[in-house]
Image: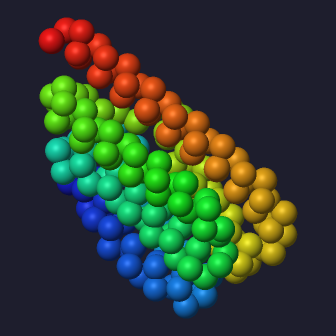
Amino acid sequence: MHQLPNLLTLLRLALVLPIAGLLLSDRHALALLLFAVAGFSDALDGFLARRFGWTSRFGSLFDPLADKLLLVTSFICLTVTQVLPLWLTLVVLLRDLLILLGAGLFRMLAGPAEFSPSRLGKLSTLLQMVLVLCLLLELSLVPAFGQVRWPLTWLVLVVTLCSGAQYVWEWGRKFRYARMRA
């Protein structure tokens, strides 16, 4: 049973390509169903890992990767089909790239460091997931969700930018501290 969170992570990874195919072919109802399954598996995976201590090195690496891959793929597909604006997807992608490059650069210049997502980073990811869910609901079942598209889009933009700035600030602070200790 302690491998169940890892199996749920693998399920999420396996759903990325089918969701992408459904989004690109404008089959939003089925994409919504699979995206909801992926979201539920993420929540269940996290609950089981915390509640029962069913954590593993695999889960710590692949759980956030599965989330990012699902979100980035969804954002790209929704941009290609002109549901999301290109500028929002670029901001989301650039923030993630900035975090990866910053962590890699820190490791090269200052050595290994503990990395954990900030609350703002988690909020950014949550809002991105909510945006995708709302868009899929709007496009498949509840057109009234169209009223929240732009306010939520702007909220995702602001929180994503703030989260990116916070990561730059934190990694810069950690780097200065590491340099002073060296």
Q: Is residue 86 something that shows in the picture? A: yes
Please determine whether, in this image, residue 141 is positioned above or below residue 153. below
Judge whether residue 1 can be spotted in this image: no
Nearest the camera: 73 or 10?
Answer: 73
In this picture, is 12 found above or below 45? Answer: below
Name of the residue lying farthest toward the top: 181
x and y percent of residue 55 in the render?
Answer: 23, 42
Q: Quadrant of residue 105?
A: top left
- How many numbered discs? 0
Q: Given the current orientation, which residue lies at the most extreme bottom position?
A: 25
Percent x, y of residue 150: 77, 59
Residue appearing at x 46%, y 85% in the figure? 21
Which of 40 and 91 lies nearest the eye of the viewer? Answer: 91
Residue in the image at 26% along x and 54% along y: 62
* Residue in view at x 24 percent, y 49 percent: 61
Q: Nearer the viewer, residue 117 or 141?
A: 117
Q: Which quadrant holds residue 65?
A: bottom left
Q: Position of residue 84 (x, y in %)?
A: 65, 69
Left or right side of 174 for 88: right
The structure's colour scheme is: rainbow
Q: Residue at x 31, y 17 (%)?
A: 176
**Residue 77 vertical placement versus 105 (above, below):** below
Quadrant location of the C terminus?
top left
Q: Position of residue 51 (x, y in %)?
A: 35, 37
